[in-house]
Image (cartoon, grey):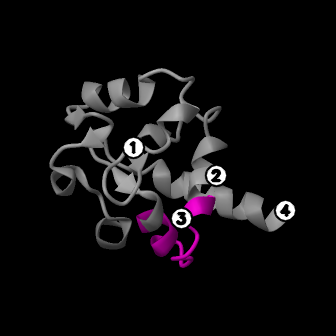
Amino acid sequence: MAKDIGFFKKVHQVAAKIPYGRVTSYGALAKYLGSPKSARMVGWAMNASHNNPDVSAHRVVNRSGLLSGKHHFGGTNLMQQLLESEGVVVEENQIQNFEKYFWDPQKEL
């Protein structure tokens, strides 16, 4: 489990760098960290980040822009509301023009 905590911390460090109004995917974070098959573990790390104000977990979505982690935001539309407050267009739990908002840590960091 200690290895998982280290991975979670690395995920949180990268996720904290996602710019306002941009989103990335679980897989993109996993790939950046050298673990391309660990997208699910990145999701667990995002779920474990809710008490860390430096990590904007709402900016991490699935590979097609779906708000797949929204149920971890208290059963509300909070994830969508947070994204929309940053100018990201969301319809029916799906980010519209996903490529416009997508932030790839491989290219940006």
Dot 2 or dot 1: first in sequence order is 2
Q: Amino acid at mark 2?
A: Trp
On screen, residue 16 above or below 28: above
Please give the residue where the numbered disc 4 appears in the rendered image: 1
Q: Amino acid at mark 3?
A: Ala
Q: Residue at x 54, y 23 (%)?
A: 75
Question: Which residues fall within the magenta stretch?
Answer: 28-41
Dot 4 or dot 3: first in sequence order is 4
Q: Amino acid at mark 1?
A: Arg
Please give the residue where the numbered disc 3 appears in the rendered image: 39
Residue 73 horizontal/vertical position (percent):
53, 29
Q: Are marks 3 and 2 in contact (CB under 8 Å)?
A: no
Q: CA distance from mark 3 to mark 1?
A: 15 Å
Q: Residue at x 22, y 50 (%)?
A: 101
Q: Which mark is residue 26?
A: none
Please give the residue where the numbered disc 2 appears in the rendered image: 44
Left or right? Give the position of 63 relative to 69. left
Dot 2 or dot 4: first in sequence order is 4
Q: CA distance from mark 2 to mark 1?
A: 14 Å
Please tell me whether residue 32 belongs to the stretch shown in magenta. Answer: yes
Q: CA distance from mark 4 to mark 1?
A: 26 Å
Dot 3 or dot 2: first in sequence order is 3
Dot 4 or dot 1: first in sequence order is 4
Residue 28 image-quadrant placement: bottom left
Mark 2 or 4, which is nearer the eye?
A: 2
Q: Are marks 4 and 3 in contact (CB under 8 Å)?
A: no
Mark 4 or 3, which is nearer the eye?
A: 3
SS at mark 2 in the image: helix
Residue 93 image-quadrant placement: top left
Residue 54 horizontal/vertical position (percent):
53, 38
Please give the residue where the numbered disc 1 appears in the rendered image: 59
